[in-house]
Image: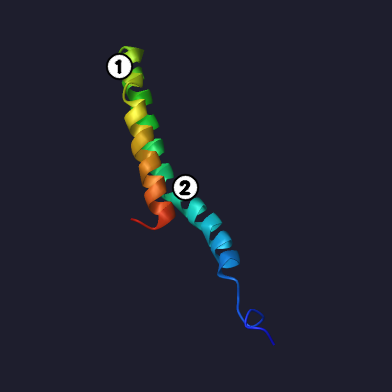
Amino acid sequence: MSEREGRIDVGDLREGDNHLNRRRAALYVAPFIALGLFDLVLLLGWGLDPLWAFMILPPILFISVLAWIAFRTGLA
């Protein structure tokens, strides 16, 4: 019996867990994206110039992507 036959390949387990981590990270970040988009709609509804309202969109998306990466990798 070879040494490899009795072991479980850890790479197979990590691939399945990675998919769950991505989904969980998306679920954790989704409320923050929704809140940011709601803020954007609220600013546009108040009559703010659309250029200024859309200037807050890149920071919202950037921070959301950083949070998604942090939750996906287990950093947070």
Q: Residue reaching furthest right?
A: 1
x then y, percent, for residue 14: 54, 63
Determine whether, in the image, residue 76 is placed left or right of residue 13. Answer: left
Residue at 60% x, 71% y: name it.
Answer: 9
Nearest to the observer: residue 61 or residue 73? 73
- Label 1 sits on what residue type? Trp
- Label 2 sits on what residue type? Ala
In terms of secondary structure, where does tag 2 sit? helix
Q: In the rendered image, which quarter contains the N terminus?
A: bottom right
Q: Which of the labelled discs sits on residue 52, or is there none? A: 1
Is residue 54 visible to the viewer in this orientation of the structure?
yes
Residue at 30% x, 16% y: name it.
Answer: 52
Q: Which of the labelled discs sits on residue 26, or is there none? A: 2
Determine whether, in the image, residue 69 is placed left or right of residue 9. Answer: left
Q: Which of the labelled discs sits on residue 27, or is there none? A: none
Q: In the rendered image, which quarter contains the C terminus?
A: bottom left
x then y, percent, for residue 48: 30, 14
In three-dimensional space, the C-alpha distance between marks 2 and 1, rounded to whole angstroms, equals 27 Å
Nearest to the observer: residue 33 or residue 68? 68
